[in-house]
Structure formats: C-alpha cells, structure tokens
Image (cartoon, rainbow, N blue to C red):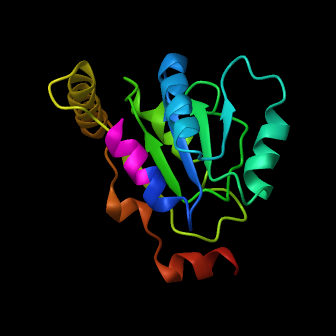
Amino acid sequence: MEALIENIKEKTGNHKILVFSQFVKMLQIVKNRLEEEHIHYEYLDGQTTDRQNRVENFQNNAAVRVFLISLKAGGTGLNLTEADYVFIIDPWWNPAVENQAIDRCYRIGQTKKVMAYRMICKDTIEEKIVSLQQKKKNVASGIISIDDEKKSFDIDEVKELFR
C-alpha cells in the first residue's frame, strides 16, 4: 500500500493513473488512503450505475488524477486515453484479463506512452499466481508457434495480386 500511494503522489502532478484490483474491498482501502492524502479520484466497480459519467469525469476533469477500477468491471467498454500509468495491485490468474484492463488506455486518441505496473508482495499467494501465469504463457507459446517465413510476404507476390 505504501509503495502504491507513494507512486500515486509522485505521479499525480503530471499524469493520470488507473488502479485496478480484483477485490472491491482492496479498492475501498485504497480509496480511504487517497481521501486521507486529499487526492481526487474516480471509482468504478460492478455496482456502479453511472459508468459513463465516471469515465467522462476522469477523462475531462483535470483535478481527478486517479481512477480506481475493479478488474472485472473495468475490463470492457472503457476508453481511458487520459491515463498514462496503470497499476494492477493484485494479479488475476488469467493474464488476458489484466491485459484487457491495461488496454483501456490504448485506444484511438492516446498520445502518451503508457506505463503499466503489476504490484506483487513477496511470499504471498499473488506471487504464486504470477508464477502460474508464467507457466500458462509458456504452455501457450509452446502450442501456438509462428512460422516467420510463411507470415511474411514477398514483394513480387504482392505485385502479382494486382496484375
């Protein structure tokens, strides 16, 4: 928590930040800390009914520098191109869900480089989840291989299409 708050305080002057957690209770803890530090934020979880208003406030209000989002609620349908820092504060067993959350920043209109961080505490279940994610990636890359020779085009082959 201390590392997260320190990073947020350090970056809120010039950057907008997304903070994802799979646990609503964890987001509540972060929310309380942000309030203690007088840092303006927006909040979105599965119970949020005015999603679009929350998104627009984050996107358009210069005073709102942080957006707290539950991983499941924020995985689809959000365009958050004002953000250029993403923190995932607890990993999800499926790395595709995390990547989908990070992709909220990578939309048409994004002009900044985006930095994404996964915050993991040593000797925790989260550390074990990250290890399992890596094993899952290794299995997937072993099954799905790309033939570099066949995925490239010869310029003469392309020209032949137009004759």
> In the image, what residue occupies the spot 29% across and 30% down?
133
The quarter of the displayed image where residue 31 is located? top right
Nearest the eye: 141 or 120: 120
Residue 31 relative to residue 128: left or right: right
- Residue 118, quarter of picture: top left
Query: How many numbered discs, if any?
Result: 0
By secondary structure, the bulk of the magenta-drawn segment is best described as helix
Residue 49 can be seen in this image? yes
Q: Nearer the viewer, residue 109 or 11?
A: 11
Above or below — where is 125 with respect to 131?
Answer: above
Of the pair 106 and 48, the residue shown nearer to us: 48
x, y percentage for residue 83? Answer: 61, 56
Residue 71 position within the rendered picture, expressed as x and y whole percent measured from the top left: 54, 29
Q: Does residue 139 belong to the magenta stretch? A: no
Can I make out residue 100 in this image?
no
**Which residue does the image show at 62% across and 42% down from the upper left?**
67
Quadrant containing the C terminus is bottom right
Picture quarter with the N terminus:
top left
**Which residue is at 73% across, 37% downward?**
77
At x 47%, y 71%, the residue is: 153
Report x, y in % for residue 74. 63, 33
Q: Where are the magenta residues, as a range?
A: 1-7
